Image: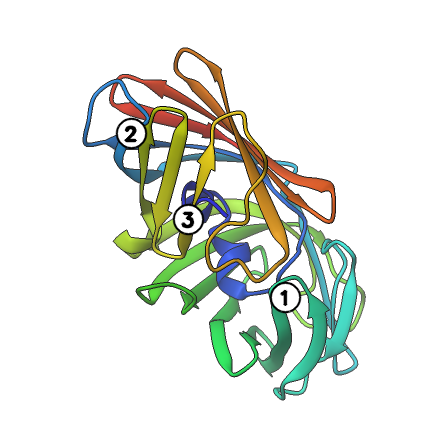
């Protein structure tokens, strides 16, 4: 996944709950080089806007269910590793720490990918997720704040219910910084958790270090616009449109 997506979908990546519902999001980044996609960029999380990003969880009777994941799934929430069949992830660990706190972690094989702590506010209306992403050259950290849109079932944990993005909090620079190089029709994307080399308008390629079975196709759609189309098993799972406006790169996912 392109590194600009880290800023736009930080919570999903960090929790390691792979293949959750994709979010429609928008953010901007500032480049080191004017007027070209080529260069090094840093995402401005303060500019992020999101819609259609409702996440739906239930923690009850010792079980965690992600209703907004595609497909939805459930595992035992007893603080022990549970095998799962999710793209890029083969085990998750979820625990109900106390009435207001959840902890989670993910791994692939013997490699732990990430961990997080979910803390519900005293009034139950917001939830702060403090995350660590270990799946990259550098370990990165950050926070994401969610706003409740619907309560969970009676008797369920406080983290249950429907949530939407309220705020992307501070995050490690490495999680926000990415670059592009363009040489003729060849485009090279680099970031902390990988990248790709592709031909503009050419065949889809597998991003480096991708363990999800995903591929990406890159097109130049205008004088200063580009499109990255991410697919898995022949199905489009995300489209990222990029527009260069001087020293600013706008991304709509």
Furthest-top residue in this view = 223
Earlier residue among tags 1 and 2:
2
**Which structural element holds mark 1?**
loop
Can you tell which quarter of the image residue 229 is in? top right
Which of 126/123 is in front? 126
> Looking at the image, how many numbered discs can be counted on the residues?
3
Give above or below for 205 relative to 88: above
Q: Residue at x 53, y 35 (%)?
A: 25
In-image side of 240 versus 27 (left or right): right
Give above or below for 52 relative to 207: above
In-image side of 162 versus 187 (left or right): right
Earlier residue among tags 3 and 1:
1
In-image side of 203 versus 86 (left or right): left
**Which structural element holds mark 3?**
strand
Circle 3/circle 2 CB separation < 8 Å: no
Which of 203/148 is in front? 203
Which of 201/169 is in front? 201
Residue at label 3?
A: 195
Can you tell which quarter of the image residue 18 is in? bottom right
**Which structural element holds mark 2?**
loop
- Judged by depth in the image, the label closer to the viewer, 3 or 1, is 3
- Report the Cα–Cα distance between label 3 and label 1: 34 Å
Q: 10 Å neighbourhood of mark 3: few (<14), some, or many (≥20)?
A: many
Residue at label 2?
A: 38
Q: Residue at x 32, y 64 (%)?
A: 137
Q: Residue at x 62, y 76 (%)?
A: 92
Earlier residue among tags 3 and 2:
2
Please provide percent x and percent y for residue 249.
35, 26
- Judged by depth in the image, the label closer to the viewer, 1 or 2, is 2
Give above or below for 244 relative to 74: above
């Amino acid at each position: 996944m392109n590194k600009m997506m880290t800023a736009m979908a930080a919570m999903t990546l960090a929790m390691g709950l792979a293949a959750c519902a994709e979010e429609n999001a928008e953010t901007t980044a500032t480049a080191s080089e004017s007027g070209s996609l080529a260069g090094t960029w840093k995402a401005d999380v303060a500019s992020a806007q999101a819609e259609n990003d409702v996440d739906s969880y239930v923690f009850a009777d010792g079980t965690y269910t992600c209703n907004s994941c595609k497909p939805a799934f459930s595992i035992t929430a007893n603080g022990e590793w549970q095998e799962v069949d999710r793209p890029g992830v083969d085990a998750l660990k979820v625990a109900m720490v106390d009435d207001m706190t959840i902890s989670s972690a993910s791994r692939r094989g013997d490699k732990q990918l990430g961990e997080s702590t979910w803390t519900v506010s005293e009034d139950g209306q917001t939830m702060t997720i403090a995350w660590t992403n270990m799946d990259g050259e550098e370990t990165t950290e950050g926070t994401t704040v969610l706003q409740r849109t619907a309560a969970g079932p009676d008797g369920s944990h406080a983290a249950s219910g429907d949530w939407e993005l309220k705020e992307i909090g501070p995050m490690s620079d490495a999680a926000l910084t990415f670059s592009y190089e363009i040489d003729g029709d060849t485009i090279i994307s680099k970031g902390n958790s990988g990248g790709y080399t592709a031909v503009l308008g050419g065949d889809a390629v597998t991003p480096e270090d991708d363990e999800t079975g995903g591929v990406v196709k890159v097109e130049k759609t205008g004088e200063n616009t580009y499109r990255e189309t991410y697919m898995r098993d022949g199905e489009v799972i995300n489209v990222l449109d990029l527009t260069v406006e001087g020293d600013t790169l706008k991304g709509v996912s």
